[in-house]
Amino acid sequence: KQEVTQIPAALSVPEGENLVLNCSFTDSAIYNLQWFRQDPGKGLTSLLLIQSSQREQTSGRLNASLDKSSGRSTLYIAASQPGDSATYLCAGGHSGGGADGLTFGKGTHLIIQP
Amino acid sequence: DTGVSQNPRHKITKRGQNVTFRCDPISEHNRLYWYRQTLGQGPEFLTYFQNEAQLEKSRLLSDRFSAERPKGSFSTLEIQRTEQGDSAMYLCASSLASGLQETQYFGPGTRLLVL
């Protein structure tokens, strides 16, 4: 059974800093890895998806990497802004057929101090 | 706004009552997922449809939970005889089956409180 762990559970940094959020998973037979953002009381917004054959994906100030052999993914946020404050969730997809859904970590609660 | 809508957004009910939630996916998406999220946890996968076929339901939490997607468009999730432990956010997601590039898009969720 896939287990996903996110470290740290919470992070508070001053505006402008670059930061890294970590995600580890136990089953390397991962199909893809998706990073989401969740604002309080809201649904999830997809940020980046990395296919199992890829090493990284970039979107604006965000860069996500995937290392299947070590069971790790990182989300790098450059030049952080107060609007980046949210909970960030990583999730592993399996089989490609949807049968297992996504397996989520508990998230990293990020606060960017103005 | 991802294009996935859920109704109602909030539901308060008394223990023992039945509740039904609706999800309208992005129109061209053939896959639809239901998840449950409790406070401080990531979403937990419940069930999955491809078109109108429910291809995975063993992860539904008990036989009090059931889901339908009668015409391959909207879906409903029903909880019978609700219990206080059912209080959670119920999230729906949809996707277009496209191999490795399949991205799930989530709705805003329905927050259930069972008194």
Image (cartoon, grey):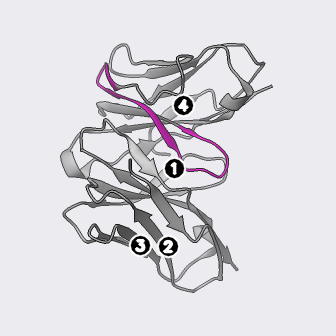
Pointers 2 and 3 in contact (C-beta within 8 Å): yes
Q: Chain of mark 3?
A: A
Crowd around label 2: few <14 · some 14–19 · many ≥20 (10 Å): many
Asked if the magenta segment contains residue B51, the reply would be yes
- Residue A107 higher or lower than A66, as above or below: above
Residue receiving disc 4: B6
The part of the chain drawn in magenta is B36-55
The mark nearer the N terminus, 2 or 3, is 2
Label 4 – label 1 distance at C-alpha: 13 Å
Image disc number at residue A44: 1
* Image spot of residue B4 (x, y percent): 46, 36
Label 2 – label 4 distance at C-alpha: 30 Å
Front of the two marks 3 and 1: 3
Residue receiving disc 3: A74
Label 4 sits on what residue type?
Answer: Gln
* Element at label 4: strand
Residue at (29, 32) in percent of width and height: B28
The mark nearer the N terminus, 3 or 1, is 1
Label 2 sits on what residue type?
Answer: Leu
Pointers 2 and 4 in contact (C-beta within 8 Å): no
